[in-house]
Amino acid sequence: MGPVVDPVEPNDKLPERVDVVVIGGGIIGTSTAMYLAERGVSVALCEKGHIAGEQSSRNWGWVRKQGRDPREIPLIIESLKLWSTLNEKIGAETGFRTTGIMYGARSDAEMAKHEEWLQHSQPYQLDTKAIGKAEFEKLMPGSDGKFVGALYTASDGRAEPQKAAPAIARYAQRMGAYVLTNCAVRTVEQAGGKVSGVMTEKGLIPCSHVVLAGGAWSNLFAGNLGIRLPQLTVINSVMRTAPLENVPEHALWVGDYAFRKRLDGGYTIADGSTNVHELVPNSFKFMKEFTPAIKLEWRSYQIAMNGRFMQEARWPKRWTGDQTTPFEQIRVNDPAPVEKVTRRALSKLTDSFPAFKDAKIVQQWAGRIDVTPDIVPVISHVDSIPGFTIATGFSGHGFGIGPGAGKLIADMVMGRDPVVDPTAFRLSRFMDGSPIVPMGHA
């Protein structure tokens, strides 16, 4: 069972008409609805389950510039500016705090690999720096003394995944947005070759623009519209502890584990690298596009062959607005955590920081992460359907980048000058012959 998410009271009826329908109630969808509503655009946010029910409440809660693909750096810079004033703006607690994030190194070779990333940060004058053993131990007391240093960004932070998107959704409501939960969008209606509305399980919502921010479900939804969206999913498992004292305040990543302090005094802990990919029909359909990433990151992936293959194989590929869809049959993606992975992460963490031996694990969960071939999101209009925009494939980086992405999407929908150049996020990069360059290798 997934984490307990702050509740959002939905609107009780469909609007007669809106300018924009946003599909998906995660951090991307809620942030998009917020910025549209603030600007006076009428918007309905449709979520098949509950707000932040899937990966937006199941991620680590990191809000970081450090380690980003260069294509994402301008957007995360903007996003961190937005996070820094978001609690005050919306009058609610998102959990955001500027606490610093580190990528630890236990060998000179690991340190050298971290330092390679600094070349990407230089054009943006980030505060990321390499620190040595003495500064690491000052900032991260209680380690086993085997760290040689770290990459450190003091201005990075953390927020609470179970609080942030719900708080943003409630604010969007106050700004005039409709928030509709247990309301799956089945398909997009078109007239005259462009968007004219969406058909939901509860009825039609006329509109002139649709934003698909459906996370792991986006490929299936887009396929029904004849759009090829190369996207797969991986599962990441997480645990949280009861409040714990005498352990570091800063968030830390190493290959074996990652942790960060929570607002409640506990810690979120996960394996630093391991993700599980369940083989499904799309694994073979998109194999060519994903081969470059697999070659570079094969050590980080475990392959599972289970019932998910046949489940997805049975899903319809095309349907109409009067047919029940998989979005209604599975309200919340709730994969089981891989406990051997979380146990190993906790064991390795305890070896490095003995104070964690007192940690009481109060919950474990997993999330299904939407991934693109280059591990960079798609934020793009779809040329074949005027009025349709896709925002998906955030590849495990979407929580921190969420407010900035929402602002960018709102700019694009409204035809404004975008807050950052979205060219690198265009969907067509997977079809126009552009080389597929996985994250960090651009």
Image: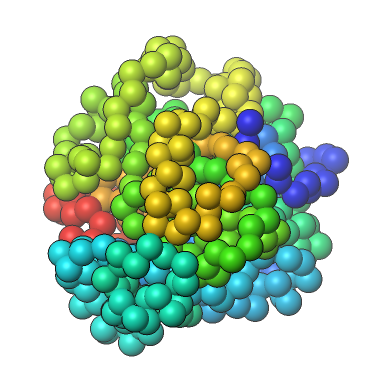
Q: Depth check: 126 or 394 in front?
A: 126
Q: Is residue 228 at least partly visible in the picture? A: no
Percent from the top left, x then y, of residue 165?
A: 65, 55
**Residue 156 appears left or right of 299:** right
**Vertical placement of residue 307 versus 424, above or below:** above
The spot of residue 170 in percent (x, y) is 77, 57
Task: Name the quadrant containing residue 362.
Answer: top right
Task: Residue at 70% x, 59% y: name it.
Answer: 264
Query: Residue at the location (63% across, 63% down)?
Result: 245
The x and y percentages for residue 440 are 23, 61
Identify which residue is drawn at 53% across, 54% down. 356
| Residue with the most extreme right position | 12
Q: Is residue 135 visible?
A: yes
Which one is nearer the viewer's eye here, 192 or 321? Answer: 321
219 w.r.t. 115: above or below: above
Q: Pick out the residue farthest to the bottom.
A: 125
Say left or right for 181 vs 248. Answer: right
Against 199, residue 114 (above or below) is below
Which quadrant is home to the N terminus?
top right
The C terminus is located in which quarter?
bottom left
Q: Is residue 401 above or below residue 300?
A: below
